[in-house]
Image (cartoon, helix red, strand yellow):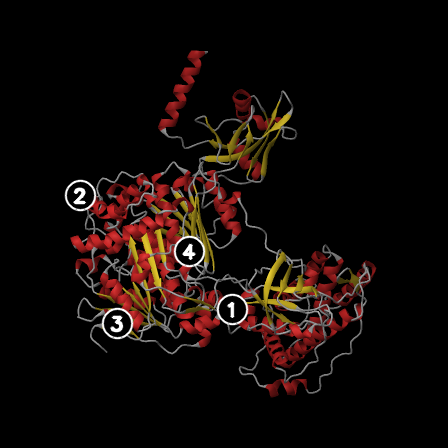
Amino acid sequence: MKRNIIVKEKMKENDAHLEIFMDRTMRTLGKNTMGKLRESRILVVGASGLGIEICKNLILTGVRTVGLYDDQQCQWHDLSTNFAINEEAVKQQKSRIEASKDTLNDLTPSFVQLLLFDAYHSKMTIEEAWSSMDVVIFTEHVFSSQLISYNNQLRKEHIKFISCEARGLCGRIFVDFLDSFVIMDQNAEKPSQNVIIGIEKGNETTIFVNDKRRNHGLEEGDFVTFEGVSGMTMLNKQEYSVTRVINTHSFMIKLNSNNFPNFGGHGMVVQVKKPHKVHFKPLEEAMKNPEYMIYDYSKLNHSKLLHHAFTTLGQYIKKYQRLPRPHHDEDTNSFLALCDHHMSDDDDDDDKNQLYTLFAKTCAGSINPMTTFLGGLVAQEALKGVSGKYTPLHQFFYFDALECVSQLNVEDASPQSCRYDGQIAVFGKKFQERLQQLSVFLVGVGALGCEYLKNLALMGVSTKGKLTCTDLDSIELSNLSRQFLFRERHIGRMKSTCAAEMVLAMNPSLNLEALQDKVSSETEHLFHSAFWESLDVVINALDNEEARRYTDLQCVHYWLPLIEAGTLGAKGNVQVVVPNLTENYGASQDPPEEETHMCTIKNFPYEIQHTIVWAKSLFDQLFHGDIQHLNDFLSQPVSFLNRMREKDLGTQVSVYESLLSNLTSSRCTSFSDCVLWARDRFQHLFYNLIHELLTNFPLDATTTQGGAFWIGDKRPPVVLHFDLNNTLHYDFLRFASKLRASNFRIPFPSRDSLSTYQSILVSYQPSPFVPSKQSMDGDDLKMADDDHESRVSSLLSSLSSFIDSSSNHSINHPFTFPLLCFDFEKDHDDNFHVDFVTSASNCRAFNYSIPPASRLFTKGIAGQIVPAMITTTSSVTGLGMFELFKVVQQLPSLSSFKNSFLNLSLPLVLSSEPAPPSVSSMFSPPKMVSIWERIPICAGRDIYLRDFIKYFDLKFHLVLEMIIWKSFVIYNVHSSPSKFLKQPLSSLVSSQSNCSIPSSTSFLYLDIACCDPQTNEDVDMPTVRYQFRNFDESQLSRLKQRKKKKKSNH
């Protein structure tokens, strides 16, 4: 091993272990792409904050070899962006590689090789380091002849090239993937798949698809293939181009089908993604005629101006051998002088001069949001370069957030020899102190939360204030590929406490409290009004809509800024919520997801997703629901049956039949019993139920209108005949048997043997199929009500025979009690949960001639797994932190704030002005107000209800008819007793809601209903913010003065 190369060797990987570790990333990129990454080698040049961010993202995405080359010594400004360097390393004058190695080695999983090239302590060249690499990323080199030379050398060696810089509030990326680069998949969208309901023959063939979906998702020029087409069977497995999109449910393909047979009623059309070849120019050529990607339509000319600014920066450094000093007038003027030759008449001089000026004043700074944002984008571009997955940047990307400083009066930006020097260079010392004094609440410490915690620590937020984070989840192996604060040694620990430990190691000055509590109406005794009133800003890092909306509502109540974000694979978004300036998060909703009718799932599946949902429901029933009912019945039979009588008859029949079966014919006391039970389940599910459906709807069945019943998305099923030599059938049998045995605490063989199952089933004979008394109600099988009643009576009689009335109504049974109920757990590969669902789903798929799905795909659908990537998460949180800078400044203009959407697969980054809050008519006489409007009531004491009512009479000339606190009606003019009028309002709230109000709570937020006595019409009113205790001296003083003034006027 060379002295100047630090190597963490790649260990032999365990496929199952790796699959769980990389699960969420694999769902975004796909298994084939992950295989390519496992053979790729990427070098990052520069161990600045940007370089470290890129390395982190590449390592956690599973790239086989990640190299980092650097020749610099640690400086104070590095600590603003580099989470791998600490203050001691700066004081000891360590090289950046030496200072970063321990953190990077700890971060790197066993299946990734990390190469650290320390050129500070040696004369190793970049050329030596990039030998055998696939992509080289330069992170600190300005535009210069040297960078052009590196690009040309790499091209000769067929190595892909990326150059990027993070300079204060501005950043850039340049990509060169050589002369001919093949994109295998241009975007992150799944190929569209549609059920064919009709085909019209002609010189060009028209395809009509199922209208149960919003649209077919195809565009002119797309390619499609056909599967399972009946009648026109020659279409199957052939590819055709889409020549015209007629509407959302029909299109034409290039095919003369005049002589084809007629369409037989069934088939699928599937989009085919074709490889696409693109050409890249070398840097020197591309600089002459650059192509830009728009990132903000309010900054259309900024990309061109930034290109000129970054080009000028290279010239400035060549001339002065340093960056312009922060907010230094002389250096700024020198920079502007170099910019003069880039001026053009078609640019707005004021906009141009302001951008160049702010660029010059801040480019020496280094801030975490920019390195985090660019670090995600650049890492994703590198992944594209080695895999061909997604469309690469072509070729320049520029970005600025100069609005963060455009209205800030920066007085002292000189270095302080502290960890925030990089940020002080941009915003000044005074603003840094404001950041440090903030009180911040971070809700969620998953993927987004880990990145946010790292960002806040590096920015110095809440070192003198307080940062509170909360998350009620524990760490799992599948978290580790994107929740970068966690390691394998942390598995099983609580996320919030573990993340706090890791981030405090980055910045020990952080004043951080880690909680493990859910933020909801159930925990308002913990997150009470005093807590919310103490905050300056809330950051949401949540993964569910209910929690998001609750936190948003609290921010509206307490007039708190909120930074909201979310990711989905390569896509992400950021929304900033500013009181009285923007709409709140809950003001808008995504369109509802397309739902599949239950009758489709139960009887007429036509996609593999349908059979997976069915199989997951089957798992829940067989291994949880039925077993829970059995436990309840065995423990308290009489009580259980009494509760069941309150259910509908259909539910009772289902539950009683399951109980009776588990106590008699399906009773399991040995593993052989479990195998026989599983064989019975196969017969029932994949033979009998299908036979039942075909009995009710034979293949020649017609609809009430006389058309064919089995057509379009109704596929006629076929029964399955059990064959132990069929792998699919065998999988269902063994996984169902083991789960059943686990339910009943029965041991089973540690290793599967086909002969074991053969010996158990040697004399097994399935019961002959007998049609049930069920009949079709529309598309569903149902039993008549009178049949239900008689069946319930018979089942109850049978169940009652098991109850021993002489022994406290107990039941004698042979089971090890209690039986084990299983909640579906997707991330434990040794529990057979996903295996069972996969086998059951694929057996049902064969029933309906649907192509089966892999275990990986099935796991994603059954486990409702959201695909995720560290690159997207990183970029999104960087964008969120830019908004924090603006929130702290309390910028008054809506245009200063930015909501952002990104799709790293395209790539697309688009920022835009947030929407203002919607307004509605309130008060009398009416005026337009928003959701942020409040009626503040503070009398210096807890007033009586009668005084509260009188206030609205005197102030607004309205009759108060109702008061609501949360979901509780506190007062109703038509029904509340008169004694309520003499009670203090807070006491009334407490008694009527049966909720004690914490002593720390000073405010109640009350919704009211009022009526105009003149017109007798209802009048909408804003929420009332009622303060009833904990008044400060200034409030009491103002109230006294107001009273004196009223008396003197009177």
Mark 4: give few (<14), some (14-19) or many (20+) Cα within 10 Å.
many
Element on which disc 1 rests: loop
Q: Quadrant of the N terminus?
A: bottom left
Q: Whole-Å distance between the Cαs marked 1 and 4?
A: 34 Å
Would residue 662 be visible to someone looking at this image?
Answer: yes
Q: Nearer the viewer, mark 3 or mark 4?
A: 3
> Separation of disc 3 and disc 1 at Cα?
35 Å
- Secondary structure of the residue carrying numbered label 4: helix
Three-letter amino acid code of the residue under disc 2: Glu
Q: Which mark is residue 448?
A: 4
Q: Which residue is mark 1?
A: 274
Check disc 2: other Cα within 10 Å, few if <14, some if 14-19, many if 20+. few
Mark positioned earlier in the residue sequence (3 or 4)? 3
Q: Which residue is mark 2?
A: 330
Give the residue displayed 20% in from the left and 52% down from the top. Answer: 316
Q: Which residue is mark 3?
A: 129
Q: Disc 2 or 1, which lies upstream in sequence?
A: 1
Amino acid on which the number 4 mark rests in the picture: Leu
